[in-house]
Structures are given as C-alpha cells and as structure tokens.
Amino acid sequence: MIADLGLIAGVALLIWLALRGVNILLAVLLSILLIGLTNSIPIADVFLQHFPFGASGAFSFAGNFLLLFLCGGLFGRVMATSHAAQGVAMGIARRLGQRQALWIAMLVCALLTYGGVVVFVVMFTMYPIGVTLMRTANIPRRIYAAAIALGAGTFTMTALPGTPSIHNVIAARSLGTDLFAGGWLGIVAALVMMFVGMWYLQWQWRRAVANGENYVANDKDQQMAALAPSDDANLPSLMRSIAPVVIVLATIVLPRLLQSFGLTYEWQSFAAGQPVLWASFALLVGSLSCWLLFAPLRGQFVTAAGRGVDDAMLPLINTAAVIGFGGVVIQTSGFHEFAGWLLGLEIPSLLSVFVSANLISGVTASASGGLQIFMSSLAPEYLADGVAPELLHRIANLAAGGLDSLPHSGAVIALFTLMGLSHKEAYKDIFVVTVLIPMLAALVAVVAALLL
C-alpha cells in the first residue's frame, strides 16, 4: 500500500512542480527520490542505475538520440537565421490573405515541423508574425496560440509518415520499422486532426467575435513585433524558403522511392535499419542546402550552428529527464500491476495500445517520453500478442500524442510563457486541439485498422 501511494505521490509531485514552473530536471529528481524511498528501491540504484542507464534511462536515451536532436536544432536555427522560416510564413500569408490567419498559422507550423524544424523554433518564428495577423484579423490571443499548437504539436509530430520527428524515430528504432510505417493510417488521422481542429478554431473565433472578445495587445507583443520582418521584399521567396524542408523530406523518402522503381543499393539497407542516423543525415543535408541557397547565411553559419546546438540541448535534457523518471517508475510493483491490468483488458490489442500509450504519456506529459517508456516496457507484449510492428508503430505514435498535452506539459507551458497567456485564459482551446481531437483521430485509426 505504501509503495503504491508513493508511486501516485511521486507522479503527483512531478505534475505539481511542473505546473509551478520548477525546472523539469529538478522536479524529476525530487519525484524519483520520493518514489524510491516509498518503494524500497536503494537510492544508489535509483540515481546511478535506473534513472541514468536503464532501458528507459535518461543517459541511455540521450546517447541514442543526441545526434538527431543536434541536427534538428541546427536545421531549425539555420532556417531562422537565413529568414527561410519567416519566408515560408510570409509567403503563405500573402497567398492566403490575412483573413485566413488561423490557417496560415497552422499550415506554416505544420510545414516547418514536418520538415524537421524544432517546435520551439517554430513557436518563436510564428509569434512575431502572428502579432500582425492577430491585430489585422482581430483574433483573440488564445485562439491564435491554439492554431500554433495544432500545426506544430499534433499531426506532424505523430501521424504523417516520413517525418523526422523524435516520436517517429523512437518507434522505428524500437520496432525495426521505417519512418513510413502505418502510413495510410497516419494520413487518415492527420486529416481528422487538421480539419476537425480547424473547424473548432474557426467556430471559437466566430463565437469570440459575437461575444465581443477581441485581440488585446500586451507589452510582449510590442517586443515580438519588432522581431518580425520589416520589409517583406528582402525575404527569400516562398519557393526558395520551403526548398530546404522539401530537401529534408526528399532525402528521407529517397530509399523507399528507389525501391518502388525496383532500384536497390547497399546504402538503402543502412537507411532502413538506422532511422536515427538517416533522419539526422536528412536534417544535415537540409542545413547544408540553406548554406547554398541563402548567401547572407554563409558568414553566420558557424555561429548559427553553435546556437542550433544550444537550441537542442534543453529539449534533449528535458525529454531525457522525463524518460529517466519513467525508468524509475517501471521498477515499481505498482507499474507492473498497472501494466498487467492494461494487458489483461478484454479489448482488442490495438485498442489496448491506444489506452496504455495515452495513459503513460499523460503521466509523463511528454509524447516522446511516454512513447519511449511504452516501447521499452509494453511493446514486446503486444508484439508477442500478434500485433504487426507497422500497426503498433503508428497507433502507439498517435496514442502518445493524446494525453501528452495536459496542463503540466513543457511545450504547453513554453507556449503560454512566450505569448503571455495563463492556463485559465487559454488551456481549454489547447486541450481540445491537442488532446481531445488527437485522441479522436487515434481512435478513428484504430477502428480503420480493425475493420480493414
């Protein structure tokens, strides 16, 4: 009883500390100390074995995925420094018109994150441009924030096949699949998230206007507006700006494309068997293409690369810390009882995957953290139960992207901090577009997989 209560208290402590803005690494260390003490796990084992080096250890994860985070940070930074990210945003805004500001925010975020730009870089890119869009179209800040979250943190993260996102790579590396596994299910789920999410945001916008809710500027808006491009004419064109993103995706799809034409080469086996390295290589190629396409970047490339490394380290440390927390949790008897209960549910295996991956991601407030814990602890049982690796890859990815965006999610807190919002003001819309609708999309994918 004490052990189970300690496990619950440890999870609750992590959530409570995260909601109060405590550094996630410190919050994790305090939480695993509580779990270790109440579950009679030797403290030396907690801090020197299970947290850092276990199958779901922080250092184990960081070592395996360091290169991917670094290349993602590099690509995001050079896209920002070259103004290619802003070029994508302004190019789409010119074509759609500022009255379509919500679609602009969602599509730009989706394009950039699908191409591998780090989500925090995307948020920072869209906010300065968004000040103008919100002011012109009279969009309440909370609704614009939800549009950013929909584009940057849902379907491009877990659903669309081929994305170099950490979630897609975790599943591929754990299951021996490739980044396109379960692709058709992912596309179905992505369409549900995109169109149902945008329907909800447009509906909320109309309601807000009818109720007299308007865009209200704050001090941070003035600071961020100064960072927006002052002269669109000096930005690279949309086609040139989006080219590095296309190059990243083309590099990832190249091995499969050649195979479909009956062309096989030795390096294709490497690409299929090493998703971390191949996705990292694609992002590196995209970064080098920025150097070739944007002359002003060349003199700043080394500095931008260094800042890209800095951009990568905080997300890597935070994600690794959450996964290390899971590495301690899975040593407890309470977790094994919980896992046994999940596996013993009298429901189809894919529906059980949906439930278990969602719950684990909700506890950790991290899709990547929850997915890594799921893959190391529960995925072997589902494979033994006959679930195809390709289906497990996609359904687990989709499910992990549901409850990951609870109020203590690091990405949610970062977005609210950036835009000067509180949970009371804005979390309802974030919850709908990043939790409820992704869970609906995952259930649609589960039903489709069971019926077809």
Image (cartoon, grey):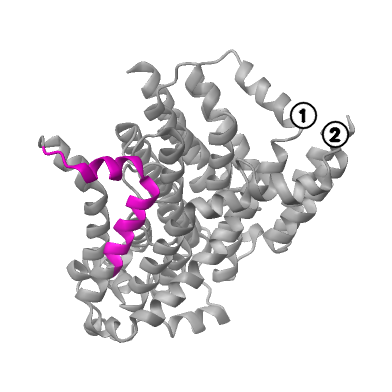
The x and y percentages for residue 175 are 43, 33
Position of residue 363 in the picture relative to residue 195 (left or right): right
Q: Quadrant of the C terminus?
A: top left
What residue is disc 1 on? 333
The x and y percentages for residue 442 are 45, 33
Tell me the magenta residue range.
263-287
- Marks 2 and 1 close (CB-CB < 8 Å): yes
Q: Main secondary structure of the magenta part?
A: helix
* Residue 427 seen anywhere in this rendered image of the structure: no
Residue 276 colored magenta?
yes
Nearer to the camera, 5 or 414: 5
What residue is at 83 percent from the left and 43 percent from the top?
42
* Residue 117 seen anywhere in this rendered image of the structure: yes
**Res 372 → quadrant:** top right
Element under disc 1: helix
Amino acid of disc 1 = Ser
Residue 28 colored magenta?
no
The x and y percentages for residue 235 are 25, 80
Q: Residues within 10 Å of mark 2 (few under 14, many from 20)?
A: some
Position of residue 414 in the picture relative to residue 451 (left or right): right
What residue is disc 2 on? 3
